[in-house]
Image: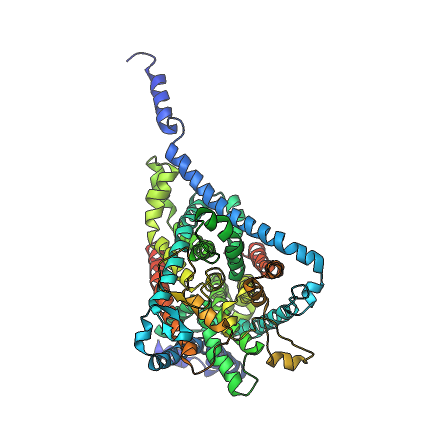
Amino acid sequence: MTASSPTVASGAVRRSLTGHGPHWPSVVFQGLLAFSLLFTLLVLLILLLDIFSRGLPVLGQRGIGFLTSSLSSNPALAGVAQGLWGSFALAIMVAVLAFPLGIATAVYLEEYASESVLTRIININIRNLAGVPSIVYGLLGLAIFVGAFKALGVGNGRNVLAGGLTMSVLVLPIVIITASEALRAVPGTIREAGYGVGASRWEVTSRLVLPAAVPGILTGIVLSLSRALGETAPLILAGAVLGSFSSGNADILGQLFGPYTALPMVVFNWTKQPQQDFRQLAAAGIIVLLAVTLAANGLAIYLRNRYGRTW
Amino acid sequence: MAQAVSQTPPSIGTSLRGSRGRRRRESAINGILLAGTLISVLISVGIVLALLFQAIEFLRLVDWNSLLTIGWYPRRGLYDIPTLLLGSAIVTLIAMIVATPVGLLSAIYLSEYASPRTRSIIKPILEVLAGIPSVVLGFFALYWINPNIVQLIFPSAGAFNMTAAGIAVGILVIPLVASVAEDAMRAVPRSLREASYGLGSRRITTSLRVVFPAAISGIVAALILGISRGIGETMVVAIAAGGTGGALRAIDPLGAGQTITAAMASLATGSDQVQGGQAPYLSLFFLGLVLFVMTLLLNVVGDVFVRRTRQRY
């Protein structure tokens, strides 16, 4: 009514736009959000602190000897050498078997196969395989791979080859899915340009599409390698030794067909022991295991951030 | 039109198709790739057949009354399946009590609140958590979570109990729930958020009343996939929940217990490692089949929900 009314009105408008002081539900909600993130960070921090405070003294005391000594019922002598060797052998087998097969399947499904009911079924099938609990793959390894080696007369069939085959089958769907996603992200225009200059399908795939998809495929490969190195449950069933054994002075063949174990199995074994000393050993083993798997994971994240691109 | 084609010299047709050697190579590569794909498919058929035959063998071998008794003691011929189902349900429930709020709130933060810079820091942390082997979480559950959290709140809790195992499984499931839910919320079109802000909504209202309901299919999928992952988790429960010899049927989250997966692990690690042909050995495959069917159903349902969000926007 009066001359001062515009300023009163603008004050009211500003007040109602910016709110009357803090909006408490928003504050509480943002607190909850911060807490949820803090929770994850805290868990990670406590886990690492706990493990390092238990395991580092052992590593410091034993030094490189911890990595080079065999399993033993004497905690002062036990080391992870056999576990390291087994994990290395498993990783090699996964790299030789699962990676080529997985990438070939992804290339076929994305670049070659025509859209049909069959490819749809295969795609759904592979997605479901990725969700099967890892211990079920262990059963497959026990029934098929260990069984086959036993039938062929290779000891009791519980050897690192059976374990490696089991792990390869376990990571195969992950390799296929990540490679498919990487291939799908390559824009169609690149393919059309290739066909336009007269390239054949394989020439387009091998010279244009695959090179463009390499960062994504590499990320998937490293992630599945880290998965294979960290999995324990399938190995329990596929015959990795829980407890100490002697590889003796067996040659490489004897080691391939003889008893084996892997890094996470060694950790599992030590964790199960009641003595305090083995608890420390388990923590030291975990540090080695984390160094291996987290390094692989970190590499994957780095590769994706460094070389990953969006078209 | 058809005449025009037939009038082109035949040499152009062949040169377009390429030389015989080139065509042969193309079809050979096609064959190799197809063979690879078929192997992948054969594997899944192999899993199902391996489980099915031995599970049937188990059901033929045992007295069906032993599937409903007082507890799971395979070496004494007691194969009470409800004991294990209850164990899995308790551990998974506790896991989801931990993972649902933390996972969903993290997803809301990452999708609605975080700046690209914060996102690029927080995402890798979640990914590192996802990359920690489950045997490590088992160790952590047994020697840190149990004495420092569970036994502090419930002094009556034993050295091995399902609560500590459940919490650790929950920690393992957080990254999965967070990433599937975040994907779903990021798939909600910007226009919905802008419409909400245009009406004068706060960020909290936009997040909870617009984006969250719009992404509900994907969020349900995240929880279903989380449950499936929790049911299938083996090492944490095998280490921290105890019950290595067997377990009585009971609902006691503070006591030792066995889940389907832990029962399989302990069958395979028992002092007398499983021998072929006997009922305890075959029971492994029966449990495997139960587990396979349960997780498969959950994954299929989860997948349907994931695709529903993708189709809508």
Whole-percent x, y for residue A171 in the image: 50, 69
Q: Quick check: A188 left or right of A85? A: left
> In what quadrant of the picture does the N terminus of chain A appear?
top left
Whole-percent x, y for residue B216 in the image: 33, 51
Please say if A51 is above or below A11.
Answer: below
Tell me if I can see residue A134 in this picture. Answer: yes
Query: Residue A223 versus residue A184: which sits nearer the camera?
Result: A223
In the displayed image of the protein, which residue is found farthest to the left?
A1
Please say if B184 is above or below A82.
Answer: above
Q: Residue A302 occupies which quadrant of the picture?
A: bottom right
Q: Quick check: A155 left or right of B236? A: right
Please say if A148 is above or below B203.
Answer: below
Whole-percent x, y for residue B139 in the image: 53, 58
Q: Residue at x 39, y 28 (%)?
A: A18
Q: Residue B220 occupies which quadrant of the picture?
A: bottom left
Query: Residue A90 versus residue B310: which sits nearer the camera?
Result: A90
- Total marks shown come to 0
Query: Residue A14 versus residue B183: which sits nearer the camera?
Result: B183
Please say if B151 is above or below A209.
Answer: above
Tell me if I can see residue A103 in this picture. Answer: no
Query: Residue A69 versus residue A114: which sits nearer the camera?
Result: A69
Q: Residue at x 71, y 62 (%)?
A: A64
Q: Quick check: B73 left or right of A278? A: left
Whole-percent x, y for residue B41 in the image: 43, 76
**What is the image's colouring?**
rainbow
Q: Residue A245 occupies which quadrant of the picture?
A: bottom right
